[in-house]
Image: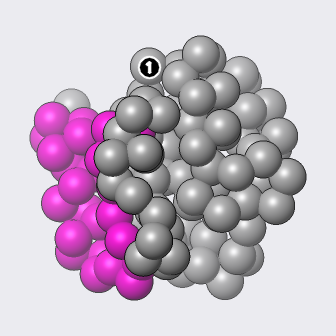
């Protein structure tokens, strides 16, 4: 399967960060959707069926941990959770259903490697 066949959902409340990821992933051929928060993400998952979800831990209405649990109830898509707060724990993210955890800041190359691994490319 080619990269262009995969849809990625970015869930992050920082519009500049979402835009940068959207551009970087789109340039590599992925179909990209984005959401600023949990409610928007849950609505998108119900209609767009992403193949992978990039989820920030700190969201305005519902945190990433609860969002991850809710997403897991709707979708089998791998979830890569990220956080810029070093006190957040990889173990908590994984226990909530995340497939992987990535500390911010991260390089696009590391993100791409983790996406490819999660999608088994």
Residue, disc 1: 76
Quarter occupied by the N terminus = top left
Q: Quadrant of residue 36?
A: bottom right
At 45% from the left edge and 71% from the top edge, which residue is drawn? 87
Task: Tell which of 84 and 110 is nearer to you.
Answer: 84
Q: Which residues are magenta?
A: 98-121
Quarter occupied by the C terminus = top left
User: Which residue occupies the extreme front position in the image?
Assistant: 87
How many marks overall? 1
**Residue 104 appears at what percent x and percent y?**
41, 78
Question: Crowding at label 1, few (<14), some or many (≥20) Cα neighbours within 10 Å?
Answer: few
Taking the magenta stretch, the answer to whether it contains residue 108 is yes
Q: Secondary structure under badge 1?
A: loop
Taking the magenta stretch, the answer to whether it contains residue 104 is yes
At 50% from the left edge and 76% from the top edge, which residue is drawn? 85
In this picture, residue 67 sits left or right of residue 54: right
Task: Tell which of 49 and 98 is nearer to you.
Answer: 98
At 66% from the left edge and 63% from the top edge, which residue is drawn? 58
At 72% from the left edge and 24% from the top edge, which residue is drawn? 47
Task: Tell which of 85 and 23 is nearer to you.
Answer: 85
**Residue 22 appears at what percent x and percent y?**
54, 67
Q: Quadrant of residue 38?
A: top right
**Residue 120 appears at what percent x and percent y?**
15, 35
């Amino acid at each position: 399967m080619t990269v262009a066949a995969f849809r990625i959902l970015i869930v992050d409340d920082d519009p500049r960060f979402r835009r940068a990821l959207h551009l970087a992933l789109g340039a590599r051929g992925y179909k990209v959707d984005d959401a600023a928060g949990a409610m928007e993400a849950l609505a998108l998952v119900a209609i767009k069926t992403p193949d992978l979800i990039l989820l920030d831990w700190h969201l305005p209405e519902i945190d990433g941990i609860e969002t991850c649990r809710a997403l897991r109830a709707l979708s089998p898509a791998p979830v890569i959770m990220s956080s810029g707060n070093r006190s957040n724990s990889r173990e908590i993210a994984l226990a909530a259903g995340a497939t992987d955890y990535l500390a911010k800041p991260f390089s696009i190359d590391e993100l791409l490697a983790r996406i490819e691994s999660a999608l088994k490319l």
